[in-house]
Image: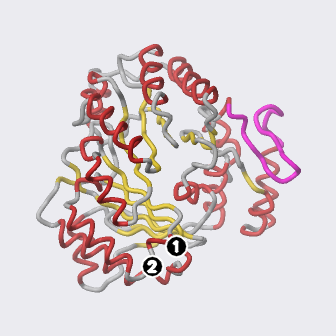
Amino acid sequence: MAGLYIHIPFCRSKCAYCDFYSTPHTQMTERYVDALVKEWDMRRDEVLSKDISTIYIGGGTPSMLDDSLLERLFKGISQRCDVSRMVEVTLEANPEDINARSLDFYRSLGINRISIGIQSFDDFELRTLGRNHSAAASIAALEALSASGINYSADLIYGVPFRNVDEWKVNVDRLLAFRPPHFSSYLLSFEPGTRMYAALTTGKLEEVTDETAVKMYEVLCVASEALGYNHYEVSNFAQPGMESRHNSSYWTYTPYIGLGASAHSFDGRTRRYNPANLKTYIDAVERGSAPFEVDEEDECNRLNDYIITSLRTDKGFDLQFAASRFSTGLIKRFLRNIETLPSDSIRCIDGNRFVLPKSQWLTSDAVFRELILD
């Protein structure tokens, strides 16, 4: 089992909170799509193409690609792996790009899951976040998704400045009224280099208090649990059996290849990353050069990665799996760190899996600081 991630960096405009690599729609879109196909042709043997079981097309805004270019991309990818047999093929989309016609087209390509960036049903919040769509567009998109029967996930953001817990609950209730198969909800973070970070540093915006953030998270957890959702990762909730197959691979040490500018890859031991520059990436691929650099991680860093990602999930840290991947000395150091924690901060299941109580997921960084190895 392995995953394929494809990064489409083009956006109509940059959201005020976004620190992912993106760029305005340019005349380079055709060259970029061709470079993606060529990179896949060059790198598919890093993870055997027959092992690819999920594809995730993220961004940026992949749904803003012209139909002809999206079709060209899928045709190129399909020459090296059978998209029709993938268990999950996800396309990220903005609400304004979702309608009955677009969904029919996506399905014709083999896309069987949509990840839609709702973020909020409040137009004031959407303006604060720098989103282009309206609350009405989000509702129309969710109606189209529900009517189509396609699998989908929706994103919400909480902790938006100037908003309170009751206003957040309205957002949660509006989304859950659609009973999405899956949804993700993220606490707003102010990342250096973003417009919202600049507004924060100049006093134009304030972060919500920790107390408010915790209450918002509790609202989210209680409402989703009441409807039978599985809260399987800090920020992710799914109806039973509808967990994201692709994203789960990032948390379970599954290999994946990342294509495109700024994309990352992991083959089970080595992490690689592509340049976060459109021209640099395209020029390298067109020359026939591997566009990536190797991230020089040692074994200790790899174990730390697994500690952090696994403990953000309901499956937790699998000791037997870790012992098969990492040295005995490192595992012993990890277990010694476990012993220093308060007894109620982590649980051991069946003598093999360490799991953080869900009540501590939002503040898990404090636990991670005690567990990771120096």
Total numbered circles = 2
Q: Residue at x 27, y 75 (%)?
A: 35
Work out whether mark 1 precedes mark 2 in sequence or the reverse, and give the earlier one. 1
Q: Residue 250 got which mark?
A: none
Q: Secondary structure at mark 2?
A: loop
Residue 166 drawn in magenta = no
Image height check: is 157 above or below 274?
above
Q: Assign the magenta stretch its main secondary structure.
A: loop
Looking at the rendered image, the quarter that the N terminus falls into is bottom right
Q: How is the image coloured?
A: secondary structure
Q: Which residues are magenta?
A: 339-358
Q: Position of residue 48 (x, y in %)?
A: 53, 81
> Observer-nearest residue: 217 or 360?
217
Q: Position of residue 155 (x, y in %)?
A: 42, 39
Say whether residue 340 is left or right of residue 91: right
Say whether residue 73 is left or right of residue 186: left
Q: Residue at x 44, y 30 (%)?
A: 175
- Residue highlighted by disc 1: 52
> Observer-nearest residue: 158 or 70?
70
Query: Disc 1 vs disc 2: Cβ atoms closer than 8 Å?
Result: yes
